[in-house]
Image (cartoon, rainbow, N blue to C red):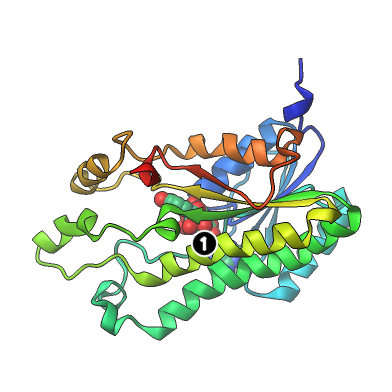
Amino acid sequence: MSDPLFDLDGRVAVVTGGMGQLGQVYLAGLVERGMRVASFDVVAGAVPEGVRAYDVDVTDRPSIARALDDLVAEWGVPHLLVNNAGLDSPPDAAAEEVGPFEDYPEATFDAVMDVNVKGTLLCCQLVGGAMAKEGRGSIVNVSSVYGLLSPPQGLYEFRRAQGETYFKPVAYSVSKSAILNLTRYLATYWAKEGVRVNTLTLAGVWNDQPKEFLDAFATRSPMGRMLDAREAVGAVVFLAADASSYVTGSNVVVDGGWSAW
Ligand SMILES: NC(=O)c1ccc[n+]([C@@H]2O[C@H](COP(=O)([O-])OP(=O)(O)OC[C@H]3O[C@@H](n4cnc5c(N)ncnc54)[C@H](O)[C@@H]3O)[C@@H](O)[C@H]2O)c1
């Protein structure tokens, strides 16, 4: 028996960064619930049956517009946009990227802000604009506990103990903070057009990190562990579904209690 509060059958979703760790899980989770799902990503790869994969750079407005035109012609205006594409410095980033703040490279700052902030803004302009014309839609902008709070640099002490200079870089945090107010801005802007806009804030996702990091994370986390990517799907389903019809401008925090102490 389907529950009308959570019924997504036949609705259309766009997931940016659909080829990434979390993106893949969103694609599968939304298809399982009967949605027709499009992935917008710069990277190609295998997608679950029922997913259309588009080659889209979210920092490039014409590439978003092309994919959206095609998608609308095939399936109609999306009901859900998950702005999940993101750039962070990988653990093996160049030394200057993870070195002292005083020397943090401008070019890296620009690249991270471009994808995480401008990319989200452009997708909201185009996909959200089309939703507003339809008088309905839900946008989920993905943030991080590192956008709510500073990264605790102590989590990375094990790297310094190995003789490296390592600080979790600044741009990711700044970009993910910007998401919180982009969401609030758009939630109020489109409130009467029926487009709801919310932030989904996640804590660190388990991805086979080094034991020293997992141990440090467990000490910092009230639940004593990282997020399993599959645990992020429920919040997206809630924000996509009629169950959240009065929820807009909010921040749904899925962090195992990280921000509670
Ligand atoms: N993994 C975590 O611990 C964690 C924690 C909190 C929040 N998040 C957020 O969740 C989202 C997904 O994270 P993830 O861990 O799956 O990352 P990921 O690196 O595995 O995936 C990101 C995806 O975005 C795509 N992408 C990058 N630049 C793009 C561009 N210009 N245009 C289109 N696609 C682009 C990449 O190709 C990749 O497929 C990000 O917004 C991230 O900030 C992740």
Q: Quadrant of residue 35?
A: top right
What type is the residue that disc 1 sits on? Answer: Gly
Residue 206 in picture, x, y percent from top left: 37, 42
Q: Nearer the viewer, residue 48 or 102?
A: 102
Residue 42 visible, this orientation: no
Residue 187 visible, this orientation: yes
- For the N terminus, the quadrant is top right
Residue 25 in picture, x, y percent from top left: 55, 41
- For the C terminus, the quadrant is top left
Instruction: Please identify the residue farthest to the top as the structure is shown.
Output: 1
x 70%, y 31%: residue: 33
Under circle 1, the secondary element is loop
Q: Nearer the viewer, residue 249 or 104?
A: 249
Residue 243 in picture, x, y percent from top left: 72, 32
Q: Is residue 204 above or below residue 181?
A: above
Q: Quadrant of residue 174?
A: bottom left
Q: Give left or right: position of 221 versus 68.
A: left
Whether ligand 1 has any atom under 8 Å from the Cβ at mark 1 is answered as yes
Q: Which residue is mark 1?
A: 86
Q: Is residue 247 above or below residue 70?
A: above
x 49%, y 64%: residue: 177
